[in-house]
Amino acid sequence: ADSAGDMGGSTSSSAVALPEEAKQRLTSIELAELQAAFAVMAPGGSLDAQSMAAALPVGLPWERLHSLLVTEVAKEGAAAVPQPGALSYAGLVLGLARTIRARQPARDKMRFCRFLYAEGEDGPLGAAGLSALLRGALHASRSGEAAASTASEGFEASCAEAAALPADDWAGWAADQLPALHLAFEDYILGTLRGLGGPDGSAGSASAAREPILSHVLRDDQLEQSLLSRADAWLLGVAAGPATEQRGWRCLYSSSAHGLSLSRFAHHAVGYGGGPPPPPGPPAGRRA
């Protein structure tokens, strides 16, 4: 067993002295599940990027996440990083506390999202990076499940100008225009790790950036003909902010259900007081 002063290892949580920062930001249940997950990923007590990626479901850049966690805790020394490029259990939970559970402004949380897909630290994401980031967030919001529908051809178009922004400008734009984006990654990453070490292998609660369920709004045949795909609806929801039980989607007007005339559209849509969420706008300083 590890000594009380040893931060690392994969024995019971009572035998591992964890940093206060981790214990303050992660619950005892989360810590226990994460320790069980660590034992699965790193039975030898040292977690490298390849082992982490191999143990977790495809769909997210787990090796990039591992690199970020190592960078966050490197100053703690061998207790957190026992070997170059590897994490101890304490290093893993401390890294998660400083990223997934960080108490920091939204701009900094967006930098975390960007790091997972950016080629460089300061340059623009580029079209390919932005596309990968948005589709990764959509995948995460679905808890890694297979897509019920694909994104439309214009899925990234509403955010295309942001692909050319430098890192700091992009973080500010994303915090303003897509305030729930980071929640998709944070909820899925922590839920997936907890699920690996949970008693039934299941993840945690639904993401606050989850994809909206439209089946109660439109029938399947209406969804197939709709201009608004589920993926596009998700992007609008991310722009509107974190999902809550009080905020849901409802159909104001459907030509297949209510008719094609302008009068029928007016009857169902005019006077609605809630107001639709605005689509993501152009980066600051640029005209739409």
Image (spheres, rainbow, N blue to C red):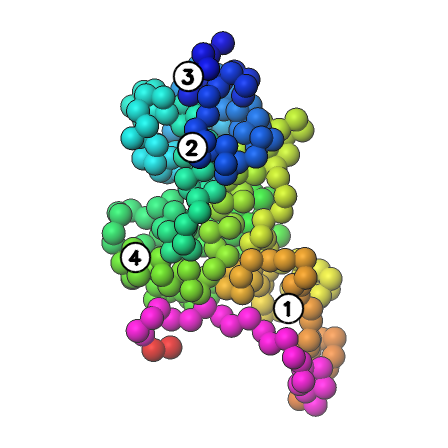
Is residue 261 visible to us here?
A: no
| Residue wearing tag 1 | 225
Amino acid on which the number 2 mark rests in the picture: Leu
N-terminal-most mark, 3 or 2: 3
> What span is in magenta?
263-286
The structure residue drawn at horizontal position 74% and vertical position 79%, both measured from the top left corner, is 258
* Separation of residues labelled 3 and 2 (CA atoms): 14 Å
* Separation of residues labelled 2 and 4 (CA atoms): 25 Å
* Separation of residues labelled 4 and 3 (CA atoms): 38 Å
| Residue wearing tag 3 | 6
N-terminal-most mark, 4 or 3: 3
Determine whether 247 is above or below 88 in the image: below
Decide whether residue 144 is among the magenta residues: no
Amino acid on which the number 1 mark rests in the picture: Gln
Where's the C terminus, which quadrant? Answer: bottom left
Q: Label 3: state its secondary structure.
A: loop
| Residue wearing tag 4 | 168
